Structures are given as C-alpha cells and as structure tokens.
Amino acid sequence: MNRNKVLDTVSEMPQEFEVENLIERLLFIQSVEEGLEQSKAGNILSIDEAKNQLSKWLQ
C-alpha cells in the first residue's frame, strides 16, 4: 500500500472517527489488494480444491 492510498482512505473517513476503524479499513484494503495480486499471479484454488482444504482444516 502506498502513502497516497492511506491519505485517500483517511480523507474518506468522517470528520470524527476512531483510530481502530481506520486501521481496520486499511488492513481490509491491504488484504483485498494482496488477494487481487495473488489472483493475477495465478495463485488461486478451484472451488473443489478450496472445499478439500477447508474440510481438512475443520477436522
């Protein structure tokens, strides 16, 4: 994430806000951006692969 993205996010916040809300929003944006980059790089699972991994984790 770059400084401009952080500044844009701060400017989109209401005049009064909790710092925790800003941090949560920045972490969410970072997670989405990382997921999009992984998708572009081909680091994805099919639905069946995801279900298989999830079933292993939930045992």
Image (tube, rainbow, N blue to C red):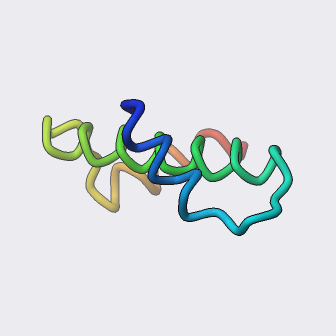
Is 48 above or below relative to 40? below
- Residue with the most extreme front position: 15
- Residue 55 in the figure: left or right of residue 6: right
- Residue 28 in the figure: left or right of residue 32: right
- What x and y, as percent, mark residue 8? 45, 52
- Residue with the most extreme left position: 41
- What x and y, as percent, mark residue 36? 28, 48
Q: Residue at x 26, y 55 (%)?
A: 46
- What x and y, as percent, mark residue 49? 34, 49
Q: Residue at x 33, y 61 (%)?
A: 47
Tally of numbered discs: 0
Front residue of 37/59: it is 37
- Residue with the most extreme top position: 2
The quadrant of the picture occupied by the C terminus is top right
- What x and y, as percent, mark residue 15? 74, 65
Q: Residue at x 59, y 41 (%)?
A: 27
